[in-house]
Image (spheres, helix red, strand yellow):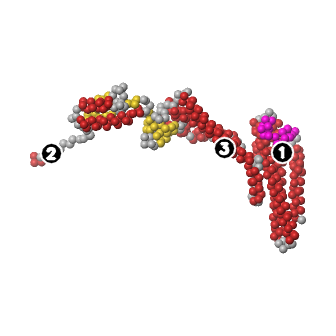
Amino acid sequence: MFFSRSLLVAIAIFALWPVSLSAQSAGDSGRDSSPPAVRINDPQIPIDRLQIKVKPMTKSELQREADAWFRLLRKKGGQIAEARLGVKQVISDLETTAAEATDAAGATTGSETADAGAEVEMAEAKQGLLADVNVLQDERTALSDRLEVVLTSLERKGGDAEEYRSYIAAVSGIELDTSDIEAAWSGFVGWLLSKEGGQRWAWNLAQFVAVLLITAIVSRIIAKSVNWVLDRRVKISQLAERMISNSIKNVVFVIGFAVALTTLEIDITPIVAAIGATGLVVGLALQGTLSNFASGLMILVNRPFDVGNVVTAGGITGTVDKMNLISTTFRTFDNQTIHVPNNSIWNNVITNITANENRRVDMEFGIGYGDDFEQAEQIILEVVKSHDLVLEDPAPVVVTHALADSSVNIVCRPWAKTSDWWQVKTDVTRAVKRRFDEAGISIPFPQRDVYVHQVDASAK
């Protein structure tokens, strides 16, 4: 008896679907006397074809088209609601059957067998209704996608699609009944295996990853190509080459990332609009950064240094490692990495130590007043001329130029390649000290003579 009553309820629900939908359709027709849209005759039209067909349509035609697809979407939503009510009813009947079976524990075996059979059939009916819900949700998603195509074209031609989009957002997505584990699991598995659910998002994720990988590869190829062109066709500094190629690489990657987001069905228009709206606020908040940006451009244009140059700038002395439009990276001689803001560099003195091919090595030697300064000059000159890394042109200069407090100072100024500067300085200094020791020439250090005058106390 109970099973027959439940079966009649389920049959009545399915029977009422077309009646309710017909009534709803009649009500819609009563409210909207406009002629039906042409595209409604084929609700399963491929999206790419629908995009082509709606493109030449006028605003009024698109409005009717949107209303027609919207009615289909509402009808599908009603069918899903009826199916969910059927599931709820079957679940309630199963719970009632279980309660009655517990109360009638002392009943006959035949009655227990009948109740067990009724539970099995109702469970099968429940599974069928859950499967129908999954199918209806797929169909609703397909209708939403086609309505989105129409709404996009309608907005481009000045129409208002906000109400439609709000409805789509409200009814879209997977709906799980957490009060029943079996129903929730069935809904999740059904969505996961459905063409418009899990399969669709798996394909979208695969496209997202593929687009990112292709973008990364293409951006690197473009960056290398730009480097090659700038290196061979345009004479600019390596800093500018790196900055331009890296900037182009980043721009290409950002564009690729935006395209990748569209594969996940994410509308990037609000993101772009938000970026534009916050641009002024960000600009005011990053005045210091913009100042560094402007200084970086000035450095790249004027080219006071390049990668690999030894520079004193911004209070730091080191080798220029790399540069962007915000800061310059130096590597010091004790292998420290220091990032200096471009504004601190451009607004101060910049000394490029290795900019020129040749460089003068300035040294000064002091000898005692009792030593022969001409002999010392000759020794220094011989040491300088005998060094292989000292240049003959310009000729080295060795001359006595100052009589200091404790020494006679002799200036030594040979020339060498910039790359050999440090080696020449150290080699000549060591050789001069050795030759002075051999010749008995002293190198004095600061000293002070103190004279003590004694007074005879008895003379007073």
Secondary element type, mark 1: helix
> Mark 1 or mark 3, which is nearer the start of the sequence?
1
Disc assigned to residue 71: 1
Q: Is the C-beta separation of discs 3 and 2 under 8 Å?
A: no
Residue drawn at (43%, 42%) of the image: 334
Image quarter of the N terminus: bottom right
| Kind of residue at badge 2 | Gln
Q: Nearer the viewer, residue 114 or 300?
A: 114
Amino acid carrying mark 1 in the image = Arg
- Segment tinted magenta in the rendering: 35-53
Q: Is residue 400 visible?
A: no
Q: Is residue 52 in view?
A: yes
Q: In which quarter of the view is residue 71 placed?
A: top right
In the rendered image, residue 428, in percent from the top left (x then y), is placed at: 32, 34
Which residue matches tag 3?
Answer: 209
Q: Is residue 196 left or right of residue 261?
A: right
Looking at the image, which is closer to me, 224 or 34?
224
Tell me if 323 is positioned left or right of 435 in this view.
right
Q: Confirm whether the magenta stretch covers residue 276.
A: no
Residue type at numbered disc 3: Val
Give the image location of residue 85, x and y in percent.
82, 56
Q: As rendered, which of 219 and 346 lies closer to the eye?
A: 219
- How many residues crowd mark 3 within 10 Å: few (<14), some (14–19), many (20+)? some
Residue 44 occupies which quadrant of the picture?
Answer: top right
Give the residue at the far left of this rendering: 459
Q: Which residue is mark 2?
A: 454
State which mark lies toward you, 3 or 1: 3
